[in-house]
């Protein structure tokens, strides 16, 4: 199989690179004035997701502005529950709303097993359109939510602080929760395979809420579903290239070894995990992505540069590091801070900043 040339794909596969690649979770979004303008043109956030031309525009905005090393499909994890038949809306300034919530076997029966080529066709169109716009500049990352994270929204009806409904179900009716997770494993596997067929060159599974679980519950109700998805993915793209799989589970650094054994190529870490020790803990089984605290972007340019260099130095001059924040960029961030961060990472060399 030919080796990839893009430094992001090379780092995912633990091949040597000229420098550490960088992309940023939520790199397209509300902190960019050009995003706000395109969203206004679309009308609202969901209409933007469903408009391939405008979704391509917002995917390209941070690539054009900052010269990042990878692009990420502009969409949302919640389009999958919507394609399964749930009503989805995003109130202005609030979190998402999904209804009616899943609370019984009969609610589950009403869910549909989506065909990504029809119900999520707009995502496939967007992928093809972004690949044309990128024209080989940098690779395109596709994504999905993990079954556990999607289930939190489907059972809670939106964002939650306590996760009481889904946890109540997990402890009292684990078979019902498992039945929903099984449906989501199939839906997400089909969805990601369709994304790969239509041209994404890597995929990331977001387990944003895995960190609310205890160790045993994380292994059983979150990681196991992700492991089954990874096992079911077509890891070779239509162009014959390997498609790396990134598993990002927020607040899950203590389960790192188990995640490294899931079959994925890269584990994404948040800022609570010691990156230097994490590299030793995974023993070369996977590459690591992360892990600067997004809040550093509210500090001074000098401090941002120092923190970026601290992260790069913590991983050290070894293959297999993708620089990222430990979670998504926040809307109050300003574009000049991001430009400073990207420059700090792209100008860094281990020769002059030996660990
Ligand atoms: O008002 C707006 O313009 C909407 C804000 C917004 C954006 C820009 C939402 C609403 N989603 C997105 C895009 C998005 N979401 C992307 C693509 C953009 C990029 O990364 O550049 C991706 C990968 C996501 C994934 C996503 N959506 C996750 C997992 C990643 C994470 O941040 O942990 C989750 C949990 C969601 C759900 C979601 N979407 C939007 C909101 C407000 C929420 C709820 C978050 C919560 O419950 O706290």
Image: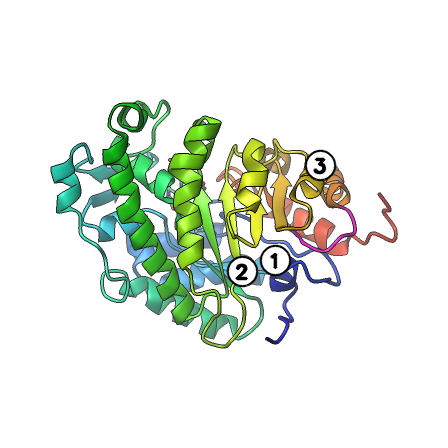
Q: Badge 1 local density, few (<14 within 10 Å), some, or many (20+)?
A: many
**Where's ligand 1: which quadrant?**
top left
- Numbered disc 2: secondary structure: loop
Nearest the eye: 138 or 247: 247
Residue 203 vs residue 349: left or right? left
Q: Badge 3 local density, few (<14 within 10 Å), some, or many (20+)?
A: few
Circle 1 is placed at which residue position? 12
Residue 96 appearing in the image: no
Q: Earlier in the sequence, mark 1 or mark 3?
A: 1
Q: Tell me the CA gap for discs 1 and 3.
A: 19 Å
Expressed as whole percent of the image width and height from the top left, the position of residue 329 reads 53, 42
Extent of the magenta region: 316-321
- Residue 116's disc is none
Circle 2 is placed at which residue position? 244
Q: Earlier in the sequence, mark 1 or mark 2?
A: 1
Is 319 one of the magenta-colored residues? yes
Q: Earlier in the sequence, mark 2 or mark 3?
A: 2
């Amino acid at each position: 199989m030919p080796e990839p040339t893009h430094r992001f794909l090379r780092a995912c596969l633990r091949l040597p690179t000229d420098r550490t690649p960088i992309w940023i979770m939520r790199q397209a979004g509300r902190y960019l004035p050009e995003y706000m303008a395109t969203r206004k043109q679309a009308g609202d956030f969901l209409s933007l997701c469903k408009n391939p031309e405008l979704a391509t525009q917002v995917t390209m905005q941070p690539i054009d502005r900052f010269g990042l090393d990878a692009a990420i499909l502009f969409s949302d994890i919640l389009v999958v529950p919507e394609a399964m038949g749930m009503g989805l809306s995003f109130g202005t300034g609030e979190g998402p709303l999904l209804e009616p919530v899943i609370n019984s076997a009969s609610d589950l029966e009403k869910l549909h097993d989506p065909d990504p080529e029809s119900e999520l066709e707009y995502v496939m169109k967007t992928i093809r359109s972004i690949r044309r716009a990128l024209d080989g500049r940098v690779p395109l990352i596709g994504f999905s939510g993990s079954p556990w994270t999607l289930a939190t929204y489907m059972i809670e009806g939106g964002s939650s602080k306590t996760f009481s409904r889904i946890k109540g179900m997990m402890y009292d009716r684990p078979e019902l929760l498992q039945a929903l997770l099984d449906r989501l494993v199939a839906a997400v596997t089909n969805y990601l395979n369709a994304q790969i067929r239509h041209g994404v060159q890597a995929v990331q599974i977001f387990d944003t809420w895995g960190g609310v679980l205890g160790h045993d519950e994380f292994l059983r109700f979150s990681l196991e579903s992700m492991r089954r998805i990874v096992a079911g993915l077509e890891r070779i793209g239509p162009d014959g290239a390997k498609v790396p799989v990134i598993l990002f589970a927020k607040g899950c650094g203590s389960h790192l070894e188990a995640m490294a054994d899931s079959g994925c190529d890269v584990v994404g870490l948040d800022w609570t995990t010691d990156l230097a020790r994490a590299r030793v803990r995974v023993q070369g089984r996977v590459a690591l992505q992360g892990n600067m605290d997004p809040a550093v972007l509210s500090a001074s340019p000098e401090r941002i540069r120092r923190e970026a260099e601290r992260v790069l130095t913590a991983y050290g001059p070894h293959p297999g590091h993708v620089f990222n924040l430990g979670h998504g960029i926040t809307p109050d961030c300003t574009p000049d801070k991001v430009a400073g961060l990207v420059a700090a990472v792209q100008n860094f060399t281990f020769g002059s900043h030996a660990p």
